[in-house]
Each structure stands twice: as C-alpha cells, then as structure tokens.
C-alpha cells in the first residue's frame, strides 16, 4: 500500500467523521471509496470525487489555521476544509464551525445548541461564547494536518 493512498484514505475518513453529514457508524470493516459520494440525499453537502489517487472536493473552501484556541485538534498551519453553511445544514454539539464575531472569523467547536444561539468554544479554552446562528458561515468537514 503506497503512502499517498494511506494519506488520501486518512483525509477522507477525517472528512467523513467531522462532516456530520453521514449517518454511517464505524464498523471496523474495510471501506473502499467509490468514485463519487454525496453524503446527504436531500442536498449535495459533502461531495468528493476520488480519481487517479487524487481527491477533488466540491463546494469547499480552504483556510489555514492561526492561533492556539483549537489545540490539540487543530494546530497553527493546518489546513481546514470548510463547506458553506445554510439554515438547513443540520448542526450538532461537537461540530467545528466557522463564524464571524467582532469582525473576525473564528473556528471553534459547538459546545451547546439553543433556540436562538449556540455556544462555541475552542478545544484549548475554558470559556464558551454565545453566538447567533446567523454568524455561522461554514462547517469544517476536514483537516489536513501540517505535521
């Protein structure tokens, strides 16, 4: 098994686990990735294509991590794959979201969901902040680790 194949499979597994779009459970069985997958029947939310040992992601932006608030999960220099957020995107505690607060983009984990807002907290932080759902602009569906 080549190193590039192992890296690609690792990226796909991380994307699936972080996306919140798949209802699959880890069964311990070997999974062979098909050429193209859509994880939601209602809408295309986590599309990727595997062709010639390369992964092509659709509707995903790329952002470099800065700061230490999400350590140890995400380190400075890691590359995050972020899909756009819409009101019908299902959210759950534990998901990592991108949102704007005080004029700055933040990427933190959802710590609690409420009717009009959610609580967001970095993995390396003791305190959570109250954020309106309208501030969310994306959901992290994968991380390419720098080291």
Image (spheres, rainbow, N blue to C red):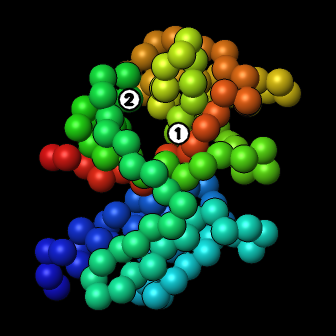
Q: Specify whether 2 is left or right of 105.
A: left
Tell me which residue sits at (36%, 74%) in the image: 55
Q: Farthest front residue? A: 103
Give the spatial CA distance, label 2 vs label 1. Answer: 10 Å
Q: Position of residue 113 (x, y in %)?
A: 73, 30
Tell me which residue sits at (78%, 69%) in the image: 42
Whether residue 62 can be seen here: yes
Q: Position of residue 65 (x, y in %)?
A: 32, 35
| Image quadrant where one finds the N terminus | bottom left
Tell me which residue sits at (72%, 23%) in the image: 132
Q: Which mark is residue 96?
A: 1
Q: Which mark is residue 70?
A: 2
Whether residue 26 can be seen here: no
Name the foreground residue: 44 vs 71: 44
Name the foreground residue: 127 vs 59: 59
**Disc 2 + disc 1, Cβ < 8 Å:** yes
Identify whether 93 is placed above or below 19: above
Q: Position of residue 44 (x, y in %)?
A: 67, 68
Residue 53, picture quadrant: bottom left
- For label 2, the SS is loop
Q: Specify whether 73 is left or right of 5.
A: right
Q: Position of residue 30 (x, y in %)?
A: 40, 83
Give the mark, 2 or 1, whose residue is nearer the N terminus. 2
Q: Farthest right residue? A: 115
Q: Specify whether 59 is left or right of 72.
A: right
């Amino acid at each position: 098994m080549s190193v590039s194949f192992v890296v690609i499979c690792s990226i796909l597994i991380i994307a699936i686990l972080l996306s919140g779009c798949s209802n699959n459970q880890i069964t311990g069985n070997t999974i062979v990735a098909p050429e193209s997958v859509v994880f939601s029947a209602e809408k295309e939310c986590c599309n990727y294509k595997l062709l010639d040992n390369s992964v092509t992601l659709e509707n995903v932006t790329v952002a470099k991590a800065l700061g230490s608030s999400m350590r140890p999960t995400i380190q400075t220099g890691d590359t995050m794959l972020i899909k756009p957020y819409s009101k019908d995107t299902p959210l759950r505690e534990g998901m990592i979201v991108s949102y704007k607060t005080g004029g700055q983009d933040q990427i933190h984990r959802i710590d609690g969901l409420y009717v009009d807002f959610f609580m967001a907290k970095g993995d390396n932080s003791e305190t959570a902040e109250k954020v309106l759902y309208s501030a969310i602009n994306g959901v992290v569906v994968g991380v390419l680790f720098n080291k």
